Image: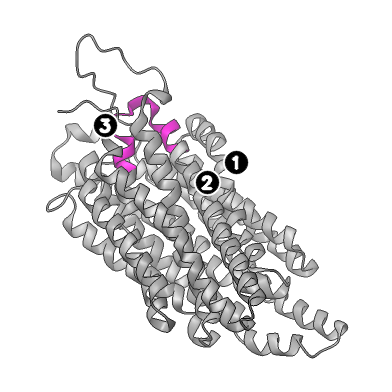
Amino acid sequence: MSNNTKSPSQAKNNTLVPIIIIAGLFFIFGFVTWINGALIPFMKTINELTDAQSYLVASASYISFVVMALPASYIINKIGYKKGMSLGLVIMAAGALLFIPAANARTYWMFLTAIFIQGAGMTILQTASNPYITILGPIESAAKRIAIMGIANKVAGSLGSVIFGAILLSGISGIKEKLDIVNDEEKANLLNTMADSVITPYIIMAIVLFVLGILIRKAPLSHVEADPIEESDSDEKAKSSIFQFPHLWLGVLALFLYVGVEVVAGDTIIAYGISLNIPVEEAKFFTLFTLMAMVATYGLGVFLIPKYITQSFALKISAILGIVFSFCIVYTTGFTSVLFVAALGIANALVWPAIWPLALTGLGKFTKTASALLIMAISGGAIIPPLYGALVDNRKEGLITNGINEASALAEAASFGYWILLPCYIIILYYAFWGHKVGLKKV
């Protein structure tokens, strides 16, 4: 990288503005991503869905990372990081606009299509911004830079969850009660009115995203490239395929599972609180608890990495905490259990910042392709939450069959679903201790 040849003060000055700009982009897709916590119970109500169906909101957003990651890598290779970021923002704006006809028709597949298009834009945005911030400075401090991005992301997510929670979930309990007693025509009118509440915020979102997409083209982002692969022995052949980096593929798996558990922690907590008979007026703030736990831990990571702890050590501690908190969720009850779901934010915060630099170590010319694979791993957010929802539905049906009333069955089933977290954190723990070293020469 060109900035490696400059003095530390010059390098810091040259990277400060790009870091601020990229942090702004992380703020944007953090805001868009974390409103899903409010969208899920909202969509469940207006479209009269099961738990498993409602979590397709997360699936529609995150499955786009599978569909679009490799095309996004191709696009970034052709047009560069900065133009790729601009394109991603414009596509996200188009997705936001599609919410208008979706709300007017109150058609679930149209909402999911709009969310998918926004996810496609985020895929391009993340495929450009994540490797950019990773290789903007020394690889050993990459987790620190990504932790700063995480703070911007989760602060935005906190704002998004609170704002959209207030807009979409206000009065939802009263509406649900009315739906049980009104006739079909009145029911349709109530649901249509509720669906219309998304139109104004998504128009505003579309305008902001489009304007930022234009402005980013003018932004002073310096050109960076990954360091070339260093051959350890004179007789060692240069790597010729992305498949020759097992530590990368294990990193993709770990990141896939991590995104899944992160989305479960953030997107299920509101519905989980409601299932425990906690009033919606209180539960709508629960995603904020998870995200604030992540922000605090990101701040700790910025201070500690790499001066006091390594990226791999941060990953080990995170995985261990995830395992401990998973047990605590299942074996506690009520608001205490909700707090342990929120505490997953502590366990999750430094996983993404740690896995990226560990997985990209030694990739050189393969960095853009490897980044696309890591972006594809975000699809874990499309797979794990619906599996959680399916566990909840199946468990609830079994309990009701055995004579448990529906409310008690839902509360117990919602808690039982969190068992899905345990194997995910165990595999992340393996990557932290051993997986990130597989295939790399020991120094």
In this view, the residue in front, 434 or 404, is: 404
The residue where tag 2 is placed is 123
Nearer to us of marks 2 and 3 is 2
In this view, the residue in front, 252 or 10, is: 252
Which range of residues does the magenta coloring cover?
A: 356-372
Crowd band around label 1 with a 10 angstrom C-alpha radius: few (<14), some (14–19), many (20+): some
Nearer to us of marks 1 and 2 is 1
Q: Quadrant of residue 246?
A: top left
The dot on residue 213 is none
Residue 11 image point, x, y percent: 20, 42
The dot on residue 67 is 1
Residue for point 39% across, 17% down: 240
Q: Tell me if label 1 and label 2 are in contact, CB under 8 Å.
A: yes
Mark 1 or mark 3: which comes first in sequence? 3
Crowd band around label 3 with a 10 angstrom C-alpha radius: few (<14), some (14–19), many (20+): some
Amino acid under disc 3: Met
In this view, the residue in front, 390 or 123, is: 390
Residue for point 18% across, 31% down: 5
Q: Is residue 400 left or right of residue 440?
A: right
Q: Tell me if label 1 and label 3 are in contact, CB under 8 Å.
A: no
Crowd band around label 2 with a 10 angstrom C-alpha radius: few (<14), some (14–19), many (20+): many
Residue 186 image point, x, y percent: 83, 86
| Secondary element type, mark 3 | loop
Q: Quadrant of residue 261?
A: bottom left
| Secondary element type, mark 1 | helix
Q: Is residue 321 left or right of residue 389?
A: left
The residue where tag 3 is placed is 1
Q: Quadrant of residue 368?
A: top left
Magenta region includes residue 176: no
Q: Is residue 339 left or right of residue 108?
A: left
Marks 1/3: CA–CA distance: 31 Å
| Quadrant housing the C terminus | top left
